Amino acid sequence: MLPEHLVARGLYTPLVGASGAISGVMGAYTVFYPRMRGRTLVIFYYVVVMRIPAHLYVLAWFAYQLLIGLISLGLPLSVAPWAHVGGFAAGAAAALAIRRWTAS
């Protein structure tokens, strides 16, 4: 939750939860399994089940967290988007380091 405290200075809202850690798992998953696909129920004018690359889900979620974080700078929130962004980045960085370490 360090990124949240660095960005939201002066806000004293307590942060409790594991969402930053879950975000780290998502970052690591994106590095280790970039080609995995997940089934998705798509509802537009018709209903269909599609297989969509998992990294698209994760990158869309990451972009949403980044957008919410930028829009809400300086505002108290009940969600910590910068903790999510930081957790994701830390998980991806750790996965890259692990992959490099195990490859050598």
Image: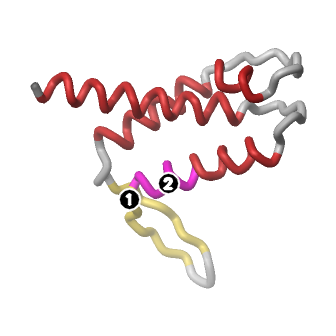
Judging depth in this view, the residue of 53 and 80 nearest the camera is 80
The amino acid marked with disc number 2 is Tyr
Q: The C terminus lies in which quarter of the figure? A: top left
Q: The N terminus lies in which quarter of the figure? A: top right
Q: Secondary structure at mark 1?
A: strand
Q: Is residue 57 magenta?
A: yes
Q: Is residue 94 above or below residue 68?
A: above
Q: Secondary structure at mark 2?
A: helix
Q: Position of residue 2 (x, y in %)?
A: 65, 19
**Dot 1, crowdedness within 10 Å: few (<14), some or many (≥20)?**
some
Q: Is residue 102 above or below residue 48?
A: above
The amino acid marked with disc number 1 is Pro
Q: Would you say the magenta stretch is mainly helix, strand or loop?
A: helix
Q: Residue furthest left?
A: 104
Q: Position of residue 69 (x, y in %)?
A: 74, 41
Residue 92: name its quadrant.
Answer: top left
Q: Residue at x 62, y 84 (%)?
A: 45
Q: Is residue 74 magenta?
A: no
Q: Residue at x 41, y 59 (%)?
A: 39
Q: Are marks 2 and 1 in contact (CB under 8 Å)?
A: yes
Find disc 2 in the rendering and name its residue: 57
Disc number for residue 90: none
Q: Position of residue 29 (x, y in %)?
A: 37, 38
Find disc 1 in the rendering and name its residue: 53
- 47 on left or right of 34: right
Q: Is residue 56 above or below residue 15?
A: below
Q: Give the residues in magenta.
A: 54-61
Q: Residue at x 82, y 39 (%)?
A: 73
